[in-house]
Image (cartoon, rainbow, N blue to C red):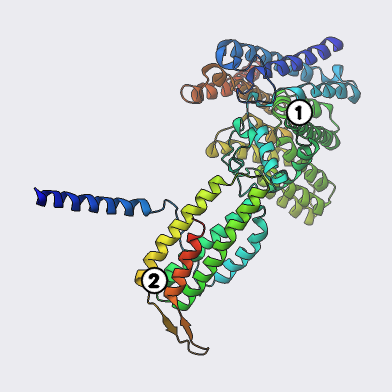
Amino acid sequence: MKRFLFAGYAAILIALTFFSYLFVDANFMYFSSPLKGFDGQHRSLIAGTYFLLISIFFGIYIFLIKNYNLIFPNLSKLKKIIMLLLIPVFAYPAMFSYDLFNYIATSKVLFYYHENPYLVMPIDFIGEPTLMFTRAANKLALYGIFWTFISGIPYLLSLGNYLVSIFMFKLFAGLFYLGLVFLMWKLTKNKLSVVLFAANPLVIIETFISGHNDVVMMFFALLAIYFLRNKRIFLAVIFLILSVFIKYATLFLVPLFLLTILQYAKNKKIDWSRFYLLAFFSMFAIFILSFLREEIYPWYTIWPLTFLVLIPQKRKLIYLYIGLTFGLMLSYIPYMYFGTYSDPTPFIKILFMLFPPACVFLYQVIKVNKKSIL
Amino acid sequence: MIRVSKVFLFVFILFVLINNQIFAQSVYVLPYPSQMPGNKFYTVNRVIEKVSYFWYFGSFGKSNYYQRLSDKYLVQAKTLFEYKQYLLAYEALLLSNQYFEKIYPYLLSAKKEGKDISEKRKILRQEGLKHIEELDKLKKSTPENFLWIPEETESSDLKIRSLINTSKNIRKKYL
């Protein structure tokens, strides 16, 4: 069964990697693909295939969670599954979001053109070939200064080769994903916590296919918590600041940090499960508030999830949240099908997003009612 | 018939002149006036300005920096001239000139670095036109010379008209 599961997991990652190449931008000139424009021509086929792939992926994930003790008797088995994540590193990154191209463009402004990306936009460089397919090129750097600075590592390692830089940025995010998973293990010594996060399809797709930097921000936030737990306040504060200067969202953890430091000062015992729950709600608040700024992006769910998996005893909340991650992955379907961000896409997106968690909630309510009747 | 032709010619010339005036106006937008000398935050503002020199790195960055400052001090000079604070206005205009002259060399170094400066060059031209437009307005509302006599320090003979002409010439060089 384990081998079958391993093969199934590899197969779904390979299928998603191939599937991503159906979304190659028509202006992406770094490789010629006969499938360019396929996503626009076969919308229902694309949407249906994606629904199938993502449902199977979540199915495997739920199976892994339910049987994690059987499948992963020790951590080395889990490492094998994690090794498989090198497959989607080779996927085309802009299947759902063009953010990775934007990271590279910002890095190029700083490390190639030697200009300040907070003052000069990529679009200012007339004739820059990547402008053909980079979106939001008319915006100044969106992320924190620490992210802009460390994004120089994958950029410079790619030695100016654009395709290599795509893989480098993904590998870079992958390293922080590994670091984050390691910290989760260090903090909980619970395999379920690790499996809940590491095997989540949303986390895998958004990190290894889209190459989002959310895991980088959360790695530094969790590292700060690790040091806070070990009463190394100075390091905790430093790493929290670094985390904030990646994507700003972890600013919402500052009150919780201050409260904990205050409790330390009063020699009070800290309930870490309560801390993680409050951290989850803090990050969930900013996740919900992101709707006011632009819209709720699926990869933002990584922020609260990082803390939720640290309290695996909160089963109901975890399943509800997994339902939300599934819903958010499904919310890509309306755009795939209609090919537009305008009506009716936004409304159907919300329906897709809320349907799975609503189903989980109803199932939980029915289950509780059945138990109380019996 | 001749009379009708004369009227027609007059209307035509008037139309061309008015139209020319419209075309002479630059689309470039100057910033709002910032803190003026004497304001308690003015010194802080100047310090931020000096520190931000390092933030505006790169050839495009530096050209933006000087462009921003040149605009800022031109607006400051304009406001101070309106309030008849001639010495401060005179100094602000001198600063605006200094900064304006520093823009183009940075665009040239950007060009040497292989950056396409055509859009930036257009913006500089528009900026120059806008400055000239404002300087022309100032010329009409300011005295040719002004002897500024402060209470304690030495008096200064401000050659306002000459400075405005020099300022215009500096801008014209980059049109």
**Residue B41 appears anywhere in the view:** no
Considering only vertical position in the picture, is A102 above or below A320? Answer: below
Q: Residue at left 59%, top 55%?
A: B63
Seen as rendered, the residue at the extreme front is B2
Q: Where the N terminus of chain A falls, by quadrant? A: top right
Query: Alpha carbon of mark 1 to alpha carbon of mark 2: how far?
Result: 65 Å
Residue A62: x percent and y percent?
74, 18
**Residue B36 appears anywhere in the view:** yes
Residue at disc 1, secondary structure: helix
Considering only vertical position in the picture, is A264 above or below A25? Answer: below
Residue toward you, A165 or A181: A165
The kind of residue tagged 1 is: Phe
Q: Residue at left 62%, top 53%?
A: B108
Residue at disc 2, secondary structure: helix
Q: Badge 2 local density, few (<14 within 10 Å), some, or many (20+)?
A: some
Q: Badge 1 local density, few (<14 within 10 Å), some, or many (20+)?
A: many
The kind of residue tagged 2 is: Glu
For label 1, the residue is A197
Q: Are marks 1 and 2 in contact (CB under 8 Å)?
A: no
Q: Residue at left 42%, top 65%?
A: B135
Residue B5: x percent and y percent?
14, 49
Residue A333: x percent and y percent?
58, 19
Q: Are marks 1 and 2 on the same chain?
A: no
Residue A16: x percent and y percent?
71, 17
Q: Residue at left 48%, top 67%?
A: B167
The chain to which mark 1 is attached is A
Considering only vertical position in the picture, is B154 above or below A186? Answer: below
For label 2, the residue is B82
